[in-house]
Image: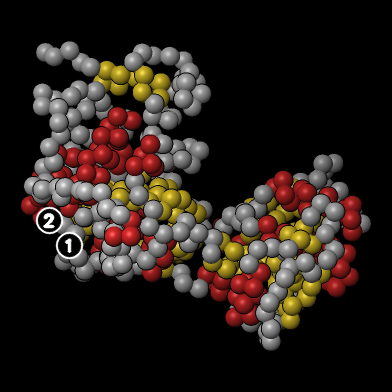
Amino acid sequence: MAKLKTTFFCQSCGNQYAKWQGQCTACKEWNTIVEEVIQTPEKSDWKSPISTVKKATIPLKIKDIDASNEIRLDTFDGEFNRVLGGGIVPGSLTLLGGEPGIGKSTLLLQISLKLPYKTLYVSGEESQKQIKMRAERINPSNNNCYILTETKTQNIFKQIEVLEPDIVIIDSIQTLHSDYIESSSGSISQIKECTAELIKFAKETATPVVLIGHITKDGNIAGPKILEHMVDTVLQFEGDRNHVFRILRAHKNRFGSTNELGIYEMQGSGLREVSNPSEILISKKDEELSGNAIAATLEGMRPLMIEVQALVSTAVYGTPQRSATGFNAKRLNMLLAVLEKRAGFRLGAKDVFLNITGGINVDDPAIDLAVVAAILSSNEDVALQKDVCFAAEVGLSGEIRPVQRVEQRILEAEKLGFSTIFVSKYNKIALKNTLIKIQLISKIEDLVGILV
Ligand code: TYD
Ligand code: MG
């Protein structure tokens, strides 16, 4: 028997070593270097099983390269198209990451079922029966979607050669293995090799390939960082599993911007595209309740009206509790300190709970003013008017700071029928003749004066 050939890989960054060592010299992580068996077959040059002759490439002047009629395949899913930058590019590799159970398989199966092209959905995780059951829930009538349960890349390519699909979906890259490498599925060398084979296939046949990738505990895509460098687009599917909303973002996109955002709602019959998120995120109430305020935020390029709820109550125990869902807890503490110091509210002995509805995490600093308004409203137990909203950052000295792209926020608020929006005095607003009243404020005391 041939002697096994092994090398050592860092499981964190994918760096390769000839012998074991405690710390990876590339990424400085400890105890991440693991021995993996690699075996190159007798004929080491990998021949593509796809019998297409690669075009010889010659250098061209950049002005002579024709990119005008760049074609994109429509995925027939508005949100997915938007995040990709207008559809999927032939020959591209897209990686979709996300927590287990978030709906990655559901999303891609749903898209495969909607496509009018010949789609091959390769699953290494579920049986054909399981996938059929899931498909029945989503969309039972489709004749163009083929399901293959296989994990060996060479066998997958054999089937592809026969079927000639227009798009290939792999669920998931961590379950694949190639005969050319001997280590187990999911190891660094396997992931690298399988991805490289798929890239070669995609580029040579101009077939788009979408890969599902698992993520690690800390939210990164499992496997080497190099995987993210190899693919053209990295998408992240996120959300709170106990809530119905799911957000699709692009972390890397060679064919479009990474600022776009797609929103879905998980239903009994698959994922529904949410094209008017603001209307759904704001609960429609007839009564005015204290502690609620609406923020005009931006998620990527997309304006999103979000409801902030605060509850301020007297602390029963010595140390008051502060808890925030969907909002940075440190930032909440900072805003409470500003309210105490600059506006004279004695919140030091109060419990403060904050919640962003819809299970969404907000990083946009423009939500600050709505958070402050919700806290004040709950503290005084006076409800804010239903049709006011807020878009400004609050600084440490209690100043109301301007936010980026304020016009877009104002227009969204106007579209949704708000009558007043509070923004910073220092924002330069070029809008004229708006129906909505733009209330300019410069200090936190101004807000207190108006609201309380
Ligand atoms: P799944 O797509 O299997 O997640 P992933 O591939 O990311 O691990 O996610 C499935 C979850 O979604 C599962 O817990 C059940 C739920 N679900 C629905 O609520 N409605 C549906 O129509 C489907 C197919 C799944
Ligand atoms: Mg899955």
Disc 2 beta carbon < 8 A from ligand 2?
no
Residue 57 seen by the camera: yes
414 versus 105 height, above or below:
below
136 versus 239 height, above or below:
below
The location of residue 42, given as percent across then percent down, is 10, 23
31 versus 72 height, above or below:
above
Q: Residues within 10 Å of mark 2 (few under 14, many from 20)?
A: some
In the rendered structure, the answer to whether residue 128 lies left or right of residue 71 reads left
Q: What number is the disc on residue 179?
A: none
Residue plotted at (83% across, 50% down): 337
Circles 1 and 2: CB distance less than 8 Å?
A: yes
Residue plotted at (43% across, 50% down): 252
The location of residue 324, given as percent across then percent down, is 68, 51
- Residue matched to label 1: 118
Residue 271 seen by the camera: no
Q: CA distance from mark 1 to mark 2?
A: 8 Å
Residue 78 falls in image quadrant: bottom left
Q: Which amino acid does the dot numbered 1 rest on? A: Lys
Q: What number is the disc on residue 164?
A: 2
Q: Residues within 10 Å of mark 1 (few under 14, many from 20)?
A: some
Q: Quadrant of the C terminus?
A: bottom right
Q: Earlier in the sequence, mark 1 or mark 2?
A: 1
Dot 2 falls on a residue whose secondary structure is loop
Residue 312 falls in image quadrant: bottom right
Residue plotted at (30% across, 35% down): 191
In the rendered structure, the answer to whether residue 380 lies left or right of residue 106 reads right
Q: Which amino acid does the dot numbered 2 rest on? A: Glu
